[in-house]
Image (tube, grey):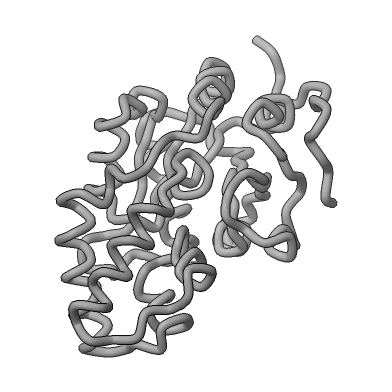
Amino acid sequence: MPSHPFTVALIDLDGTVMDSAPGITGTLALVLTELGLPVPSPARLLEFVGPPILDGLRDIAGVQGAEAQRVLTAYRTRYRAAGAFDAAPYPGVEQALREIGAEIPLALATSKPESTALRILDHFGLRPLFTAVAGASEDESRSRKAEVVERALLLLREAGADTARPVMVGDRSHDVEGAAEHGVPTIVAGWGYGAPEERAGAIGAAEAPADLPPLVLGRAAAGSASDVR
C-alpha cells in the first residue's frame, strides 16, 4: 500500500466543492430586503459564503440577537426550498476528489447545517465520495469550523478510518483557523472565495482542482500548485 503524508482529508463544501455563491447571496439579499434590513454590497455578500451565517450577520450586516435569529430562520426556509440548488460543483473537483478518495478516506466538513449539506450532496450525486459528512447542528450550537472538524474526525474514526494524520482542504481563513485548533494543517483551495490574505497559516495551496491530489497524496505537484509555507 502506498504511503501518503495524510491518512484522511476533510473537505469544505462552499467555495471548495460547490460554487454556491449565487444561491447563498441571492437568498440572503432577498430575506434582508423582505425584513426591511440593509443589504450589503455584492462584494460584502460574498463574504457570507463559507463561514456560519450568524457570524456573517453579526460581522458584515451588523445584525445580532433575536433579529439575527429571525433572519436565519427565514433564510434557511428559502435556501432549503430553492437556493441550495442554485449552485454547481467546480469543474474538475469531482475528479480530484475521486482520485484522492481512492487512496484515503474523505469527510465533508462544512459550516452548513448537516441536513442541508446532505441534500446538496445527494442532489448533485456527490455523497458517495465521502466516508463521513459533518456539518453544523440545526440549532447552531455546533457551527464553528473547529467544532465541525472535531465532528468530522469523530465520524471518520467511527467509520474505522485512521485519523492520525488529517488534512483540511478549504478556501477561507475560518477553515485554516478551525482546523488548526485541532492541530490539522490546511491546503487552500485557490479557486474558492478566499482573499489572498486568508491563506496565512496554510501549508500549501492548490490553484486548480487538478493540483489538489498531488498535494494531498504527496506526489510531485502539478504546474499551478504552490507551497505557501
At x 31% / y 45%, what residue is drawn?
86
| Lateral position of residue 226 relative to residue 100, left or right | right
At x 41% / y 48%, what residue is drawn?
20
Q: Nearer the viewer, residue 54 or 78?
A: 78
x, y percent for residue 118: 27, 40
| Lateral position of residue 8 relative to residue 200, left or right | left
x, y percent for residue 139: 21, 68
Q: Nearer the viewer, residue 119 or 164?
A: 119
Quadrant, the N terminus? top right
Location of residue 157 by image quarter? top left
x, y percent for residue 29: 32, 70
Does any portion of residue 153 appear in the rendered image?
Answer: no
Does any portion of residue 31 appear in the rendered image?
Answer: yes
Q: Nearer the viewer, residue 120 or 8?
A: 120
Outermost residue toward the top? 1
At x 58% / y 48%, what residue is drawn?
192
